[in-house]
Structures are given as structure tokens and as C-alpha cells.
């Protein structure tokens, strides 16, 4: 009599092979997700600096501009998002991963000698994602060496409005 189908040992081998493949693939998938979060935060940081520089160059001041006037980057933490109606001048803007603040942007007060200046600082977040974001920000020249504050000036004395 001819039998068709798989023996129990063949099925066990298939299940073991599938288990090994899953054990290798799942950590790789989690690492890819973390890399995407790191890239998004760093992209948002660069976008904000670029958007703010363009706005300042066009207007000559932050004035009463709000986040919605300047950029579409979302700031704040999961539990405390920053509204798009927030005025840029003299605001503290956080880029975070969940509730871990990775980078802090502090545009200085509008008017006078502080207009057109901003300080970027490392946030207090210590997650692996925040640590990688800070390292990438140093490489992108958004933070100073060893996560030191970075001061940025937009415009200049030769900019004519």
C-alpha cells in the first residue's frame, strides 16, 4: 500500500527550520524600526533648522510667527505635544521619541541682538533611540562635540529686506 503525506519527523524538521528563521528575522525587524525612528527625528531636526532659516531670511525676524507659519515638524512628547499655534520666539521646542526628549530647540527672543539666533541642545532622553539621535546630530553639525549646545545664527548684517 502506497502512503502519501509527510512523516512526523519531516514535519518536526520543517517546524524547527521555521523557528530558526523566525529567531533570526524578528530582531532584524525591530532594529529596522528603530533605525526608521532615528532617521525621522534627525530628518525633522534638519527640516526645522532649514525651515526656520528660510523663514528668517524671508521675513527678517521671527516676530510673532507660529510653528504652523514656519514648518510642519511635530514637536513635543507623546503625553505633551506642542501645538502648532505656539509662537516660535522664546519657545522651547522638543523633538522626542515617545516621552524621551532627544533634542531641544530654543529660538531666542524676537527683536534686538538675539533675533535670528537659536540654541540646539541634547535632550534628557537616555533611550537607545535618543542616544543614536544625539550621535547623528553631532555628525550633522546640529550639536557640538560630546553633545554640547550648538548656537545657530540666521541671516546676517548683509541681508537686505
Image (cartoon, rainbow, N blue to C red):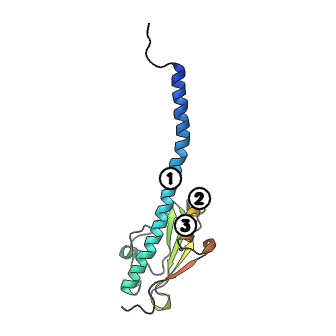
The Cα atoms of the two marked residues, 2 and 3, are separated by 12 Å
Quadrant the C terminus occupies: bottom left
Tell me the residue that label 3 is attached to: 136
Percent of width and height locating residue 107: 48, 80
State whether residue 95 is above or below residue 55: above
Disc 2 vs disc 3: which is toward the camera? 3
State the SS at label 2.
Answer: helix
Q: Nearer the viewer, residue 148 or 3?
A: 3
Quadrant the N terminus occupies: top left
Tell me the residue that label 1 is attached to: 32
Q: Nearer the viewer, residue 57 or 81?
A: 57
Q: Name which of mark 1 and mark 3 comes first in the sequence.
A: 1
Q: Name which of mark 2 and mark 3 comes first in the sequence.
A: 2
Tell me the residue at 43%/92% (across/down).
Answer: 158
Tell me the residue at 51%/64% (across/down).
Answer: 96
**Dot 3, crowdedness within 10 Å: few (<14), some or many (≥20)?**
some
Query: Splitting the image into 4 quarters, where does residue 102 fall?
Result: bottom right
Query: Splitting the image into 4 quarters, where does residue 147 fall?
Result: bottom right
Tell me the residue that label 2 is attached to: 128
Percent of width and height locating residue 138: 57, 71
Q: Name which of mark 2 and mark 1 comes first in the sequence.
A: 1
State the SS at label 3.
Answer: helix
Percent of width and height locating residue 53: 43, 80
Q: Is residue 87 visible?
A: no
The Cα atoms of the two marked residues, 2 and 1, are separated by 13 Å
Tell me the residue at 46%/71% (across/down).
Answer: 46
State whether residue 101 is above or below residue 54: above
Amino acid at each position: 500500500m502506497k502512503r502519501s503525506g509527510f512523516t512526523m519527523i519531516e514535519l518536526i524538521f520543517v517546524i524547527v527550520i521555521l523557528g530558526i528563521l523566525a529567531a533570526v528575522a524578528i530582531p532584524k525587524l525591530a532594529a529596522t524600526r528603530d533605525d526608521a525612528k532615528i532617521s525621522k527625528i534627525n530628518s525633522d531636526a534638519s527640516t526645522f533648522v532649514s525651515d526656520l532659516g528660510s523663514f528668517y531670511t524671508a521675513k527678517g525676524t521671527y516676530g510673532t510667527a507660529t510653528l504652523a507659519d514656519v514648518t510642519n515638524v511635530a514637536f513635543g512628547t507623546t503625553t505633551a505635544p506642542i501645538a502648532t499655534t505656539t509662537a516660535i520666539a522664546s519657545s522651547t521646542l522638543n523633538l522626542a521619541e515617545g516621552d524621551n526628549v532627544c533634542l531641544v530647540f530654543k529660538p531666542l527672543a524676537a527683536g534686538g541682538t538675539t533675533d535670528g539666533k537659536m540654541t540646539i541642545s541634547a535632550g534628557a532622553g537616555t533611550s537607545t533611540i535618543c542616544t543614536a539621535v544625539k550621535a547623528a546630530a553631532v555628525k550633522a553639525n546640529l550639536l557640538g562635540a560630546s553633545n554640547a549646545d550648538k548656537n545657530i545664527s540666521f541671516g546676517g548684517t548683509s541681508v537686505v529686506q
